[in-house]
Image (cartoon, rainbow, N blue to C red):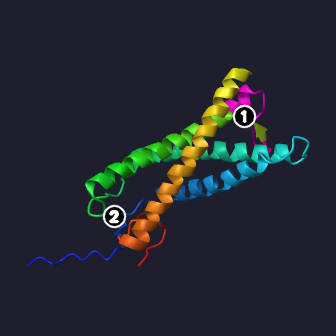
Amino acid sequence: MAEAVVNTGIPTPAARYSPLAQAFHWVSAALMFAVVPIAWYMTTLDRTDPTREGWYNLHKSIGITILALSILRVIWRQLDTQPPLTGILRPLEVAAVHVAHVLLYVLLFAMPISGYLMSAAGGHPVVMFGLFDLPSLVPVNHDLAKVGRFLHGIGQWAVYGLVSLHVLATGFHTFVRRDGLLGRMLPWRVG
């Protein structure tokens, strides 16, 4: 006689992301939650403020770090086995998750690239944490810098929307459905 399987809401190890995938996720999330308030603050500073350049360099450095992590994350995602969503989400929800993840990855690349384009084409160096300058891969071109600024401006609102949706969906699955979805990405077991 077959045993009944009870959904306790606690993901099995096979249904969890690998420790490296979890680290990529949480470090990227922490950096994103750091870079946004830095952006808000730095744009309020007067051009004569002596700390302004430091804040801009910190913002750029975190953005480039997010880009580097995103590249590694995509490579790891191709090599690592992803835990299945079957049994947790309905087919339409699975499709929505995939679309949202693709859009988040696009933003993880587009925001740092558009920021770099805005800086480099605007003739401003990208100094990594005060240690070294990134090479300028584009010529100084104010029209190109405007394109970067435009894309970065639109991208910020897309980031706000998608990250908010991601957090709200996670909260829904954690507190309403209680289906263990968050446990797939936590480094410790819940339950």
Give the distance between the C-alpha atoms of the residues marked 1 and 2, in whole angstroms.
40 Å
Q: Which residues are magenta?
A: 117-131
Residue 10's x, y, as percent?
36, 73
Residue found 45% across the figure and 63% down from its top:
170
Front residue of this view, candidates 156 and 71: 156
Q: Which residue is mark 1?
A: 134
Amino acid type shown at disc 2: Ala
Residue found 42% across the figure and 66% down from its top:
172
- 8 sits to left or right of 69: left
Quarter-of-image position of residue 27: bottom right
- 46 sits to left or right of 96: right
Residue 79's x, y, as percent?
40, 47
Q: Let me know if residue 135 appears in the view.
A: no
Up-down relation of residue 152 to residue 34 (above or below): above
Residue found 54% across the figure and 44% down from its top:
158
Residue found 67% across the figure and 23% down from its top:
144
Secondary structure found at label 2: helix
Quarter-of-image position of residue 125: top right
Amino acid type shown at disc 1: Leu
Q: Quadrant of the N terminus?
A: bottom left
Residue 173's x, y, as percent?
40, 67
Label number found at residue 90: none
Q: Let me know if residue 191 appears in the view.
A: yes
Front residue of this view, candidates 41 and 64: 41
Up-down relation of residue 141 to residue 64 (above or below): above
* Residue 28 counted in the magenta span: no
Label number found at residue 14: 2
In this figure, what is the number of numbered marks? 2
